[in-house]
Image (cartoon, helix red, strand yellow):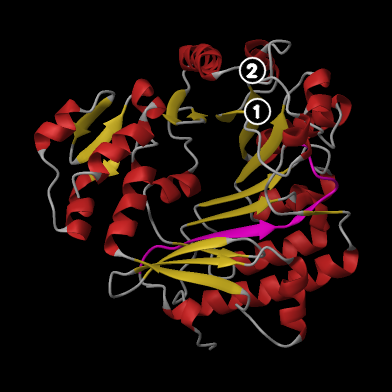
């Protein structure tokens, strides 16, 4: 069994989730700031997969035979790996048993019938980056999937649901400009491609992206609020619960993996640019991030290294409490006030809690309503000031 500071920082007796970052794309979308490489060089993907699988298997040995609570393969575009590599990764994740929820992201142009057996045997959930069903919007966003490819991917995802009961989640980007009818986009995907989960994001211009350099005119804060409110009202009228700032689910269909992030639970991240939050047996929290470099990742493996190329930081109790507050207030699971008190050795004054608009103290949690989701950062500042 490999011994290293990275693995030793986790208390593997706790429920643990795993996130795997696939840093490959067919091409980079104009708005994307996530770490990935375009071009999908076969030799790099082979070496990446070899190291990743060996790291997963080593983590498995620390899990005492237990499966991961949840697993999520994201990117980038995991579909770029192809069926064989993705199958090796999924096999490794499921060595101790299939997680209760096992999600993979995949762009619509990459989904094909070769991947279907993995949804029968491994994946329980597909998160598809659709972004828009408007050809002009897809072009504006610099998507590597045109409308025809996007629709083909959506049709295949619907077949996955019918055949294997795969849970479906679709991502959409809104607030593109006055020329774009966001509500029409949302209506189209809801009515023509039903799913139990939607992630609806307002476009953010990220530095060092092609879209940022183009500097398009986007709706101002008031305009965004109006657009998003209209979408929220529409989705809630159809029975979707607005359970996180940008996420909507039908009853019982929240993304369990992401909820563990927001509830500030332990997860391990593997792959270039992947982050981990480790809770030690001493109660200390450590943040680990792999360097965003495929070259470093595969070169390290060529030298026989596992878990190398990490930047690690031990959080102070206050830093961990601030993270717990920021994460807990952005979703309707809410902030666990008892757990916060145990971490900080302080009890937040009930009068302060009662005065925070858009939130309600409920069964020991501070829970936002829709208006609270929009003001979560301001609420977090008020609570942090009381620490």
Density class for disc 2 (Cα within 10 Å; few <14, some 14-19, many ≥20) is: many
Q: Relative to 320, say whether 230 is above or below.
A: above
Image quadrant of residue 177? top right
Q: Residue at x 31, y 39 (%)?
A: 380
Magenta-colored span: 14-30
Q: Residue at x 41, y 76 (%)?
A: 9
Q: Residue at x 53, y 74 (%)?
A: 60
**For residue 323, side relative to residue 196 (left or right):** left
Q: Is residue 178 magenta?
A: no
Q: Relative to 55, say whether 221 is above or below.
A: above
Q: Secondary structure at mark 1?
A: strand
Q: Which mark is residue 307?
A: none
Q: Residue at x 48, y 35 (%)?
A: 253
Q: Relative to 48, say whether 377 is above or below.
A: above
Image quadrant of residue 214? top right
| Circle count | 2
Q: Which mark is residue 186?
A: 2
Q: Where does residue 171 sit, x and y in percent of width and height?
A: 64, 32
- Work out whether mark 1 precedes mark 2 in sequence or the reverse, and give the earlier one: 1
Q: Where does residue 371 sit, x and y in percent of width and height?
A: 36, 21
Whether residues under marks 1 and 2 lie with C-beta atoms below 8 angstroms apart, the answer is yes
Nearest the viewer among 136 and 58 is 136
Density class for disc 1 (Cα within 10 Å; few <14, some 14-19, many ≥20) is: many
Image quadrant of residue 327? top left
Q: Can residue 334 be seen? A: no
**For residue 72, side relative to residue 280 (left or right):** right
Q: Which residue is mark 1?
A: 172
Nearest the viewer among 353 and 72 is 353
* Mark 1–mark 2 distance (CA, rounded to whole Å): 8 Å
């Amino acid at each position: 069994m490999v011994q290293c500071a990275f693995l030793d920082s986790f208390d593997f007796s706790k429920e643990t989730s795993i996130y795997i970052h696939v840093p490959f794309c067919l091409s980079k979308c104009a708005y994307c700031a996530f770490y990935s490489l375009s071009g999908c060089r076969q030799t790099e993907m082979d070496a990446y997969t070899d190291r990743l699988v060996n790291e997963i298997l080593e983590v498995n040995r620390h899990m005492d035979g237990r499966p991961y609570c949840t697993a999520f393969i994201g990117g980038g575009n995991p579909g770029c790996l192809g069926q064989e590599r993705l199958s090796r990764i999924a096999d490794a994740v499921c060595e101790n048993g299939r997680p209760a929820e096992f999600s993979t992201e995949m762009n619509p142009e990459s989904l094909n019938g070769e991947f279907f057996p993995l949804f029968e045997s491994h994946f329980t959930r597909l998160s598809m980056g659709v972004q828009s069903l408007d050809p002009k919007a897809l072009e504006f966003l610099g998507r590597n999937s045109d409308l025809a490819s996007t629709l083909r991917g959506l049709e295949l995802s619907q077949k996955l649901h019918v055949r294997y009961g795969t849970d479906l989640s679709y991502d959409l980007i809104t607030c593109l400009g006055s020329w774009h009818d966001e509500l029409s986009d949302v209506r189209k995907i809801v009515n023509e491609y039903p799913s139990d989960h939607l992630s609806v994001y307002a476009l953010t211009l990220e530095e060092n992206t092609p879209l940022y350099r183009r500097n398009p005119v986007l709706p101002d804060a008031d305009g965004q609020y109006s657009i998003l409110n209209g979408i929220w009202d529409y989705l809630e009228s159809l029975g979707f619960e607005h359970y996180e700032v940008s996420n909507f689910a039908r009853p019982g269909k929240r993304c369990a993996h992401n909820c563990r992030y927001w509830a500030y639970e332990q997860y391990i991240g593997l792959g270039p640019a992947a982050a981990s939050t480790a809770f030690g047996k001493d109660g200390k929290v450590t943040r680990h991030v792999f360097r965003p470099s495929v070259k470093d990742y595969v070169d390290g493996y060529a030298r026989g290294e596992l878990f190398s190329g990490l930047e690690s930081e031990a959080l102070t109790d206050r830093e961990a409490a601030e993270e717990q507050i920021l994460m807990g207030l952005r979703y309707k699971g809410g902030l666990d006030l008892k757990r916060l008190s145990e971490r900080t050795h302080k009890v937040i004054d009930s009068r302060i809690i009662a005065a925070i608009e858009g939130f309600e103290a409920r069964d020991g949690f501070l829970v936002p309503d829709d208006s609270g989701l929009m003001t979560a950062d301001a609420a977090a500042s008020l609570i942090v000031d009381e620490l």
